[in-house]
Image: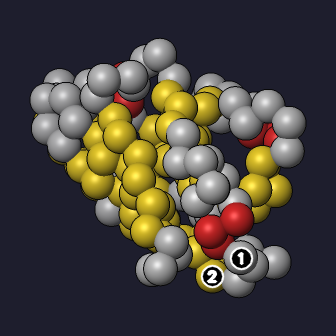
Amino acid sequence: QVQLVESGGGLVQAGGSLRLSCAASGGTFSAYPMGWFRQAPGEEREFVSAMSSSSGLSTYFADTVKGRFTISRDNLEKMVYLQMNSLKPEDTAVYYCAADPEGSFRSPEDWHYWGQGTQVTVSS
């Protein structure tokens, strides 16, 4: 069983930056691909970014955040990060950390473990 706890959300002006953190416990962290999703009010949860396990370290991004967000992980500390730059009001959402996907990692249904989420609000 893997437990995930996100932190780092908050209120930021458009054009600003935030770094989200996700602390993992349980399981073999280095073996799990890790990902970030977000969900705005009234919207479905959507893929933001993912990073493969330590064997590959490939990264993937939604088109809406490509070039603005980066994902990284620290396997020793069991942490995954989402650096968000040039934030826009449309980035406002609850951001969720996820672990251990099966199948298409872009679908929320394919991920086994989830954190509780952290709110990101971008003001215009």
Q: Nearer the viewer, mark 2 or mark 1?
A: 1
Q: Percent position (x, y) of residue 48?
A: 52, 34
Q: Percent position (x, y) of residue 114?
A: 69, 59
What secondary structure is found at the residue carrying circle 1? loop
Task: Tell me: residue 36, above or below residue 118.
Answer: above
Q: Percent position (x, y) of residue 55?
A: 63, 55
Report whether 68 appears left or right of 37. left
Q: Percent position (x, y) of residue 119?
A: 42, 52
The answer to whether residue 89 is seen in the rendering is no
The image quadrant that residue 36 belongs to is: top right
Q: Is the residue marked by circle 1 packed among few (<14), some (14-19), or many (20+) residues within 10 Å?
A: few
What secondary structure is found at the residue carrying circle 2? strand
Which quarter of the image is occupied by the C terminus?
Answer: top left
Q: Which residue is mark 2?
A: 25
Q: Nearer the viewer, residue 34 or 120?
A: 34
Which quarter of the image is occupied by the N terminus?
Answer: bottom right
Q: Which residue is mark 1?
A: 28
Residue drawn at (81%, 56%) of the image: 112
The image quadrant that residue 25 belongs to is: bottom right
For the residues marked 2 and 1, what is the alpha-carbon distance in whole angstroms?
Answer: 9 Å
Report whether 5 appears left or right of 64. right
* The furthest residue to the front: 55
Query: Given the image, on which type of amino acid does mark 2 rest?
Result: Ser
Report whether 26 appears left or right of 76. right
Q: Nearer the viewer, residue 52 or 21?
A: 52
